[in-house]
Image (cartoon, grey):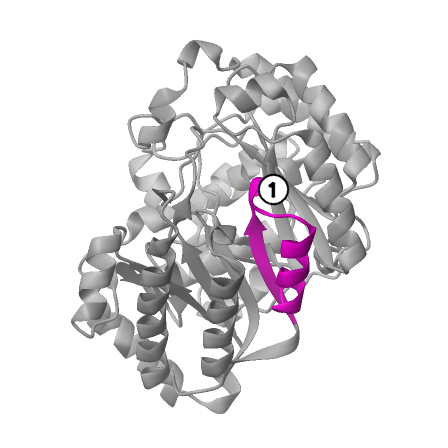
Amino acid sequence: MNTVTPELLRRFDVAGPRYTSYPTADRFVEAFGATDYLQALGQRRDGPAALALPLSLYVHIPFCESLCYYCACNKIVTRHHSRSAHYLRYLSREVDLHVAQIGLGQTVSQLHLGGGTPTFLNDDELGELMAMLRRSFNLAPGGEYSIEVDPRTVDEERLKVLARLGFNRISFGVQDFDPDVQKAVHRVQPAEQVFQLMEQARAIGFESVNVDLIYGLPRQTPESFARTLRQVQQLRPDRIALYAYAHLPERFKPQRRIVSADLPGAAAKVDMLSQSLSAFISAGYVYVGMDHFALPNDALAVAKRQGRLHRNFQGYSTQPDCDLIGLGVSAIGRIGATYSQNAKTLDEYCDHLDQGRLPVVRGLALSRDDLARRAVIMALMCQGQVLFESIELAWLLDFGSYFASEMEQIRELAAKGLVVVDSAGIQVTANGWFFVRAVAMVFDRYLQADRNRAKFSRII
């Protein structure tokens, strides 16, 4: 059982980044564009063979048939499925431009289709997309090939198609099973439908079948969410992603349809998180980190035990820390010591490709300080510890003097039981692992400089 009390949760309920990257995406600048990205691709192409690690691919499918009011993703709500065929043509152009830079047949060990709703594409279109990727890249045997699935868009036959196309991991967006909550967020999907799909997915042979949940939604109460938790325990997915809803209607228009008075208060959210931790850990799940839980024999839980956990723009991963090519509207990539992001609107994305240009419109070339801090933050987020000597040798710095002010804050967290500090390094405690974002934030130079956290979701 976990020993994280509601009081501890309240104390560390602050806003902060999720650290799928460092520096975080809000630090990207328009001064970094397609020319800089091309240079990064060229450095990868011309670099030593030993550095040519497998690639990771992310493909953003922006379309959704209906609007979920809580959503903060980049999406296009439409019932006109003809738009996806048009989009695939532009994705093909973007892939071709990459192949022209890095060559045909680069090995890929991880592929993720996100959105939007990737299953907005029909079976033929999904087949066309996968064939396009296989023509251009070498999808390695044993890789992670995952897709986000809206349960309302699939049945058993569609699941079989996904398996035949090579997907071995699927994630169902559940959010909440309570009918009142589903109505309040405009996403009605009966629990029976999800239970049936989970059973079918297992029978088909997917390596990992996962669910996403959100707490803090309108009309949720600790009592109603407890019922959802019991149903999830019955489902027993391989992995669970549990996210806190961040209500930012000034930034995300769909959220303006949510009645603020229907949102649970801070105390109720803490109760929901506390009972979630207890429910999943008592059911045998391993707390992987942040908001992720996995069954003990799942690859993610195994990677955590063995110190092989990694983190990228899709969250925790078992794959080595590799370059990521982002394809599609708003997709984010990482090549070498750079981050890049594509145009956020479909018109702008297509316009760049019509002119024969990669659609990168912003990004960042990381400084030496950025890289050193990224190493510290990712070590905390993934391994739960930082060894001073490893950072000093890699970045030729003296940890104690370079991070003198940060270590003062770390000692304060040590006094609160979140970390242990000794001559060798910083170790996150069992309780501290639940607040690892708060520990990592100490080393975020940008965040410490401006303390402007309103743009981020709260940790709880």
Q: Position of residue 198 (x, y in %)?
A: 73, 45
Residues in magenta, as a range: 143-168
**Residue 92 as seen in the image, left or right of residue 281:** left
Q: Is residue 165 above or below residue 73?
A: below
**Quadrant holding the C terminus:** top right
Q: Residue at x 52, y 32 (%)?
A: 459
Quadrant including the N terminus: top right
Mark 1 Cα within 10 Å, few/some/many (few <14, many 20+)? some
**Foreground of the two, 361 or 141:** 141
Q: Nearer the viewer, residue 393 or 164?
A: 164
Q: Is residue 59 left or right of residue 226?
A: left
Question: Is 73 on the left-hand or right-hand side of 386?
Answer: left
Q: Is residue 335 above or below residue 18?
A: below
Q: Quadrant of residue 206?
A: bottom right
Amino acid carrying label 1: it is Pro
Confirm whether residue 4 shows in the render: no
Residue 136 falls in image quadrant:
bottom left
Q: Is residue 145 magenta?
A: yes
Residue 321 seen anywhere in this rendered image of the structure? yes
Q: Which residue does the image show at 25% across and 70% down from the upper left?
A: 358
Residue 137, position as x, y percentages in the image = 49, 80
Out of 20 and 404, give the one closest to the viewer.
20
Q: Is residue 98 left or right of residue 206?
A: left
- Where is residue 455? Give x, y as percent: 34, 34
Residue 153 versus residue 328: which sits nearer the camera?
A: 153
Find disc 1 in the rendering and name its residue.
151
Q: Position of residue 340 (x, y in %)?
A: 32, 62
Is 93 above or below relative to 72?
below
Residue that extends furthest to the top in the rendered view of this protein: 261
In terms of secondary structure, where does tag 1 sit? helix
Residue 406 inside the magenta-drawn segment: no
* Image point (37%, 21%), residue name: 257
